[in-house]
Amino acid sequence: MTLTPFNRPQASGQIQNSSLTHITESYLTYYAAGRGHTARAKRLDLRHFLQFLASFHGISNVEKLKVREWDFSSTQRFVDDSLAKGEAPATVSRRLATIKHMGRTLAEKIAGFINPAREVKAPKVSPLRPKAISEGEIAEIRDLAAVRLSRKESFIRFRNAVLFDFLLDTGLRADEVRLLKRAQIDEQLRWIKNVRTKGRRYRNVYITSAMKDKLRRYLEEREQVLKKFYAKIRPSHNAALPLFISTYNAVPGKPETFLMGAKTIWRAVNELTADSPLHPHLLRHSYALDLLDTSNDVRLVAQALGHSDVRITMRYTERKDEEVASALEKSRARKKRQLSPK
């Protein structure tokens, strides 16, 4: 089936009488064809929206929906009904964002077409402070890693233990760590150079003194493992290889085959779970909250995390209701002491 709006220009009048289901399928083919979380979410969001539109207009089958049935009022009603049914504001906001993106994409391709969802306001979402692991949990995790290594010495278990500490020490995203090359670590093991962020910017990331010895020992073990693949590895070859290597199906001369997979990174961290289920981004949150509590400097934390907008970092400043209540009690008690006669 040829889905014209995304293949060739079409007049605005023609599009109003087109099948909305076909338009949606065309959009999903272009923007949600993968198996990732975002692609699945887009497919789910638009399926919910089409089902709502069919019900809203009294149409028996979503296949009969026309583009003209999608307008501002129906989109606003979809948002209102979703909230009334108890859907979380964050979920409704995400669904609306998907609908708006489809409308914006059509507007860019079709002269005269106006995005029906453009003026619909998303529900306000109260930002939640990201979770972090406590110092006690970190100690338990390190103890668990040591026990696992004592039971069975292996490079993989040692690498995973160092990887946990490295993520916690640098605050890097899992994929940023996965794609790091040995050449990006300076000789003093103090800086990681030119880390590419999600926004396609580059930054340098500091390695603390507490991490240096662990990283040095890891590099020594890494060198021993690489000797099984290279009789004598040239510095240029070593520099092109990933920092954290996987030797599964690795081929000498092809540095990319030594990369850890995204799922391997997740499993490496998750297998050290103590009380809280571990995942790489939880370590990034822990890094950010610890740095914020220590420095009280949101801009410093934003730079350390590689955020392009400090507003993204502001969610780390959110406090629980109990924390607000405790702060108020302390404030009132302090004022009372100051006002009481001596």
Image: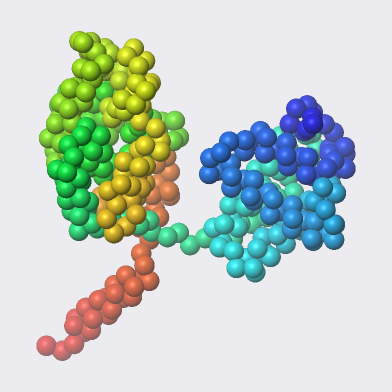
Q: Residue at x 73, y 42 (%)?
A: 24
Outermost bottom residue: 341
Image location (x, y in percent) of residue 163: 26, 38
Q: How many labels were placed on the picture?
A: 0
Outermost front residue: 151
Q: Residue at x 20, y 45 (%)?
A: 148
Q: Is residue 93 above or below residue 245?
A: below
Q: Quadrant of the C terminus?
A: bottom left
Image location (x, y in percent) of residue 136: 20, 58
Image location (x, y in percent) of residue 3: 78, 32
User: Foreground residue, 108 or 29?
Assistant: 29
Q: Is residue 1 above or below residue 128?
A: above
Query: In which quadrant of the rendered view does residue 201 lie?
Result: top left
Decide if residue 123 is on the left or right side of residue 329.
Answer: right
Q: Is residue 113 above or below residue 336?
A: above
Decide if residue 116 is on the left or right side of residue 254.
Answer: right
Q: Residue at x 35, y 30 (%)?
A: 260
Q: Is residue 177 visible?
A: yes
Q: Quadrant of the N terminus?
A: top right
User: Foreground residue, 149 or 340?
Assistant: 149
Decide if residue 99 is on the left or right side of residue 39.
Answer: right
Q: Residue at x 74, y 52 (%)?
A: 50
User: Foreground residue, 102 or 235?
Assistant: 235
Decide if residue 175 is on the left or right side of residue 334.
Answer: right
Query: In which quadrant of the rendered view does residue 225 lie?
Result: top left
The type of colouring in the image is: rainbow
Q: Is residue 289 visible?
A: no
Image location (x, y in percent) of residue 320: 36, 67
Query: In which quadrant of the rendered view does residue 340 lie?
Result: bottom left
